[in-house]
Image: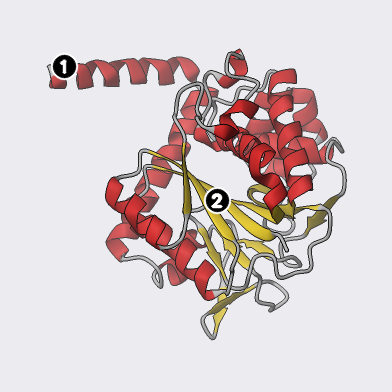
Amino acid sequence: MKKNLVLGTIKGYDFEVLRPFLATLKKAGYEGDTVFFYSQIDPKTLETLREWGVILVPFMTTPPYMEGAWARHNEWTTNAHWQNTAVHSLRYLLAYCYLKEFGDRYENVLLSDTRDVIFQKDPFDFSPQDKLYCFTEHEGSVIADSSINAMWIEKGFGKEVSDELASKPIICSGVTVGSAARVLEYLSIFVKTVVDRDVPIEIPGMDQGIHNYLIYKNLLPALQIYKNDEGPVFTVGIEDTLVRKNGHILNGHVVVPNVVHQYDRHWNVAKHYYSVRFIIRHHIAYTRGHLSTFFRSRLPGIYGSFISVRNAILRRNKA
């Protein structure tokens, strides 16, 4: 019998950032493989991850990004679209190449964020079929309600497409589940769309724009979309409040979901996993990341000037 696979990407994290993900996954009774693509991780964290049974696969942040048997599936090592990419989108290329090489070992695959995900049940404990399962965010929220989601689609596919999809529910790219064959199919379409549509994947978070485009343009066969309060994945970043009972987070139908995404944006939940100091540090980094995305995409001239000045200061300090 084939195993299931949880597949994530980590860059620059220490183990304490990843402990909630791994500890809750283990507590949920998951017995499949867990694979992390990793870059810029300190040796102590790598050693601890191995002790937790994580299969570690290194990647580079510059082309050709990967080495080993799975690297031979990267057809885009010299393609300009994949020469400059944020890790948010790069992880799809990594996952594609990895599953091309090893996908036949697995029954089902979970593509998942790592820093902001916890598990309350085995993530595959919902009788998945030969489909790709995607999950909306807060019920009632649409793309037009989120300037950053609208921006990703406009930058990736143009104003006309952004306007066309404005009234559609936001579908989160942070957690996607499916049979190994369907996930590989999804990744193949994702990677090729970047090239065919000239998508600017250097913009952090652009993967969510691509994700929504593929779904709403009906480019993904055998797709099933779950509403946020009805499926095995509960994305809580913009939920007003979270209900906890007996140590579990409940969704809008007072049901315990398998996976909770973006839990760390809620103090009443995050405090059970992290120290106050750690949470403050994380939210500062999170805010900086969003400001960087805004200026990089909306005001590229100002952003470029700021980066040039910052780099000049860093070079002078090193001299």
Circle 1 sits in a helix, a strand or a loop, which is it? helix
Left or right, 243 with respect to 316, comes to: right
Q: Which residue is mark 1?
A: 316
- In terms of depth relative to the viewer, which is nearer, 215 or 25? 25
- Residue 131: x percent and y percent? 82, 53
What is the three-letter code of the residue carrying label 2? Asp
Quarter of the rendering containing residue 72: top right
Q: Which residue is mark 2?
A: 113
Q: CA distance from mark 2 to mark 1?
A: 37 Å
- Quadrant position of the N terminus in the picture: bottom right
Callout 2 crowding tier (Cα within 10 Å): few <14, some 14–19, many ≥20: many
- Residue 42: x percent and y percent? 30, 45
- Residue 159: x percent and y percent? 74, 24
Q: Tell me which residue sits at (61%, 18%) in the image.
A: 81
Q: Tell me which residue sits at (38%, 61%) in the image.
A: 51
266 up-or-down from 37: above or below: below
Circle 2 sits in a helix, a strand or a loop, which is it? loop
Quarter of the rendering containing residue 127: bottom right
- Residue most toward the bottom? 246
48 up-or-down from 170: above or below: below
Callout 1 crowding tier (Cα within 10 Å): few <14, some 14–19, many ≥20: few
Q: Tell me which residue sits at (82%, 33%) in the image.
A: 164
